Amino acid sequence: AAEANVTTGKVLATPVARKMAKDLGLDITKIHGTGPQGRVMKSDIQKASQPKTLEKDHVR
Amino acid sequence: MTAYDIIVLGGGPGGYVAAIKAAQLGAKVAVVEEDRVGGVCLNYGCIPTKTLLKSAKVYQDLLASSQYGIDIENPETVKINWPNLMRRKTQVVDKIVGGVALLLKHNGVEVYKGHGTVIDAQTVDVGGERLSGKNLILATGSSPSMPEIKGLKESVEAGYAVDSTGAIALSEKPRSMTILGGGVISVEFATLYRSLGTKVTILQRSEGILKGVDESVRDTMQGHLKKEGVEIVTNVSIKHVDGSTVHYEVEGQAKSVESDVILVSLGRKPNLKGLENLPLEIGEKGVVVDERMQTNIPGVYAIGDLCGKMMLAHVASAEGLVAAEAIMGETSAIDYRKVPSCIYSFPEVGAIGYSEAEARAAGFDVGVSTFPLSANGKAMAEGETTGFVKIVHDKKYGEVVGVHIVAPHATDMIAEAAVSMMLEGTVYDMAKTIHPHPTLSEIVMEAAHGAVDRPIHIIKKS
Amino acid sequence: MTAYDIIVLGGGPGGYVAAIKAAQLGAKVAVVEEDRVGGVCLNYGCIPTKTLLKSAKVYQDLLASSQYGIDIENPETVKINWPNLMRRKTQVVDKIVGGVALLLKHNGVEVYKGHGTVIDAQTVDVGGERLSGKNLILATGSSPSMPEIKGLKESVEAGYAVDSTGAIALSEKPRSMTILGGGVISVEFATLYRSLGTKVTILQRSEGILKGVDESVRDTMQGHLKKEGVEIVTNVSIKHVDGSTVHYEVEGQAKSVESDVILVSLGRKPNLKGLENLPLEIGEKGVVVDERMQTNIPGVYAIGDLCGKMMLAHVASAEGLVAAEAIMGETSAIDYRKVPSCIYSFPEVGAIGYSEAEARAAGFDVGVSTFPLSANGKAMAEGETTGFVKIVHDKKYGEVVGVHIVAPHATDMIAEAAVSMMLEGTVYDMAKTIHPHPTLSEIVMEAAHGAVDRPIHIIKKS
Ligand SMILES: Cc1cc2nc3c(=O)[nH]c(=O)nc-3n(C[C@H](O)[C@H](O)[C@H](O)COP(=O)(O)OP(=O)(O)OC[C@H]3O[C@@H](n4cnc5c(N)ncnc54)[C@H](O)[C@@H]3O)c2cc1C
Ligand SMILES: Cc1cc2nc3c(=O)[nH]c(=O)nc-3n(C[C@H](O)[C@H](O)[C@H](O)COP(=O)(O)OP(=O)(O)OC[C@H]3O[C@@H](n4cnc5c(N)ncnc54)[C@H](O)[C@@H]3O)c2cc1C
């Protein structure tokens, strides 16, 4: 999968990811998408919304 | 004078859906319909043609049965029972039309039977009775165009030339049929009658049939119809009609063709009768409306074939929903680039969005990927391998902007593309979507793999 | 000793797809296959069954043709030509298997014919020849389980009892067949043989057939099969087999059934022969792997039926892609909740994601909406109205988490749901997607409308 499309302006994201980001007050353009072609998925929002300490986990 | 929130003029797939939706949203609604509810689609269009096409398909399958190991000892004993075939069509239509009448009733919509004349933006007359409505939805549909061709009117009167409504109610199977025009409806009738054994000739004014359809689809369908024995004459100029004979010119040569039936399928025009009192803005294709289906007159909406944006039943219905919602304070709109259209030929065609040429003209950074049915396991298992899928995408993000399918179930298969495009899906998403094996739908995944990188199941020249 | 980047053991839809993908990504790849490439799927499973099912469908359509207005004067002259039916099956299989062999060749994959024995994680022996590979992909598939039932072995030897491979190669049409087990494969064989006129009995140990399938689908299919004349006996305990007779107990009563053929369809077990030298971790269903299909041994991957996650060809292929990509340094993974599965019965079944019960058990705020085929215009036009769609969604955002379709083309229709779920689409998106009219796929849109608010084309009790 390619890198997130942050630089190109448009963000590929799923409807559920968008709704969840809005609910949680997250800026979807700043979230790294792991779906096909860097699409932001529900799980990416869930990860981003977790406390910072946990974020290390997914860096591996 | 009975007062309504909304009066809907015309009970076709545009009008009846708008009426039901508006009623569901709480409006008091009347529908005025001079014929049966269901409009052209249910009574004379989509449904009767597909019912007859099913019979034609059964007949074809029967003739080909021995290739599947099912023998009919004496194939001459297979007979088309024309009265039964027509009876089934009528039964199916009656049942569906009856269903729509019930739906209207259950949703509390009142149906007035008769010709409606719009008096002003709030008033409609039905046979002397006056209805008043805060809003008006015009859904009067369209009728076949009968162009000025010398002798055509007489041929119609003599019973040789018919329009599509005539062509679904012939009293016997014609031995031969000449179809004037090569659009979608022509191709469906050519499929229907050719499959039943009629000698079919299509006379087409322009260079090829199915104008507006993706080039690869046109080529495939034209080739396939010819292979099935349909004669297709292009670049034709029709000179005059003489009874059962059509005289035409092609490449400077005068020719003629005689047949049992002449089917005139040269486009349709909006039904404006009854609307004369409204100062409606009317464009080239029909009544002009904005995104919410409102005409130039506030409170007066127009939908479906009357507007002529895309003369399809599902467009009429979708526009009906938009109009009903607009009146009831909800906003929605249609992206016409995401509306599928179908041809119920054998094999079927399902298409949505930009054709390859349109996409290039629109300035996309166009990527195209195709995959043939002949490399698909299920198609081989079914013995029906004519067809392909073509995915047109914008390379920038990989967004799918057009999908064109020729396949036995293409009209059902195109829904995958429709929902993908609705969700602004990319070829990456389509490729990553696991499609079940063995299915025809795998061709979509394979073509998407081809767009991303390489398909698995075909040798790609690189 | 020839050295490869990857050795793939087994050339089924798991192995051959993994090999081609890895080769496309630049690896030097060998496939070891003791039978023909294509595995169970192409040679004895998916493809031959669907080819035979097509013949059965043609036969059924033929018997029903008069309802479509196509008469066969003397229906008794319709004959199943068993040798031709079998020959077509063989031809289709040979063609597809030949195609796979060509694909492998064109992608530069070397195929070794013979039984492979893994010596260690880098070495495979094929008939004395040693191949070395930096990585190993195990794709040896599965075989039918032959449970310990008294007399079964003798019945197999006497030629009465067969497994699925035997059931696609019978020398004549059986007058009667008893099927032990009520899973997907059983239902497909029941459909096949019942449609061809065989008297079919299914003996099922548990309360109902099609364990694991959504409740509504199970009920519909069970009812439909019974209506078609398949005898389904549930809560059965099989006691012993005596030649062509199965003795069983139901509700404390001893019973028996005699038939031409006994089909044993009681599950499948992973093929571990040749893998004995590897200290593989093996779970209840098969070889245990991580998300990237790697086993407990670094560099050794396993895919497909051998792992037994979902015993489906498209799962094997998708896992093959994951393994090939993992080895070649790309990451991908499969969400098994977004994998469709199909039953090629008449009508077909296509399903994906959570069943209603599973969704509730998983703790979703479950919404369910269904729409029947009997209210669909195209289904009426085609005269095939048994079926429905059921959409299971999570009410929080409306996300679609399961779709279950019973319909003539359900196996193609489920692709719409697959791509929707891949894109995390909601019922709102499905409802707003304009579906072409008239198509079976409209039921998906209608059910989605029902999930959001109200469908248009049915009277909903509220
Ligand atoms: C042969 C054929 C096959 C077709 N097949 C398909 C297909 O497969 N799929 C598809 O999507 N589309 C198909 N179409 C097109 C489809 O039928 C139309 O797009 C659709 O019917 C348009 O719906 P509508 O509601 O706008 O108008 P209509 O269906 O034309 O309905 C208009 C209604 O208004 C009534 N009416 C008109 N004026 C008045 C008045 N003044 N007072 C009272 N009542 C009035 C008419 O009697 C009619 O019932 C086909 C068309 C034809 C001719
Ligand atoms: C009757 C039937 C119908 C089916 N229909 C469908 C369907 O419609 N759709 C669907 O998705 N699935 C269907 N399946 C399931 C499908 O066939 C399997 O899921 C699929 O074949 C699994 O692929 P695989 O590559 O893992 O294994 P397999 O297809 O079993 O291939 C394994 C290969 O490895 C070879 N092999 C094994 N051990 C060795 C060794 N030591 N050395 C060399 N070669 C070896 C075998 O000869 C075989 O060719 C059906 C199965 C059956 C039985």
Image (tube, coloured by chain):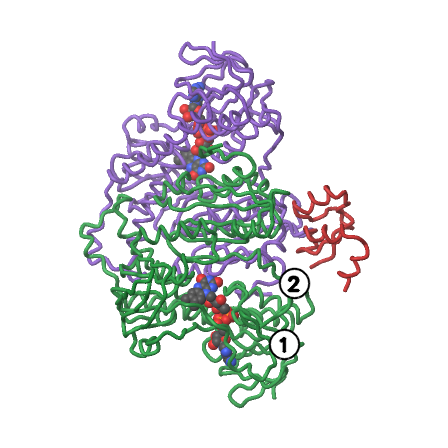
Chain colours: A red, B purple, C green
Q: Residue at x 54, y 72 (%)?
A: C286
- Front residue of A49/B228: it is A49
* Residue B146 makes an appearance in the image: no
Residue C104 drawn at (x, y percent): 53, 73
Q: Quadrant of residue B382?
A: bottom left
Q: Chain of mark 1?
A: C
Q: Quadrant of the N terminus of chain C?
A: bottom right
| Residue of label 2 | C332
Q: Is mark 2 within 8 Å of ligand 2?
A: no
Task: Check the image and report above or below for B142 versus C113.
Answer: above
Task: Check the image and report above or below for C433 versus B220.
Answer: above
Is disc 1 in the same subunit as disc 2? yes
Query: The disc labelled 1 sits on which kind of residue?
Result: Val
Q: Residue C300, which numbered label?
A: 1
Q: Secondary structure at mark 1?
A: strand
* Residue A40 makes an appearance in the image: yes
Q: Residue at x 32, y 55 (%)?
A: C58
Q: Residue at x 58, y 66 (%)?
A: C319
Q: Is residue C91 left or right of residue B338?
A: left
Q: Quadrant of residue C438?
A: top left
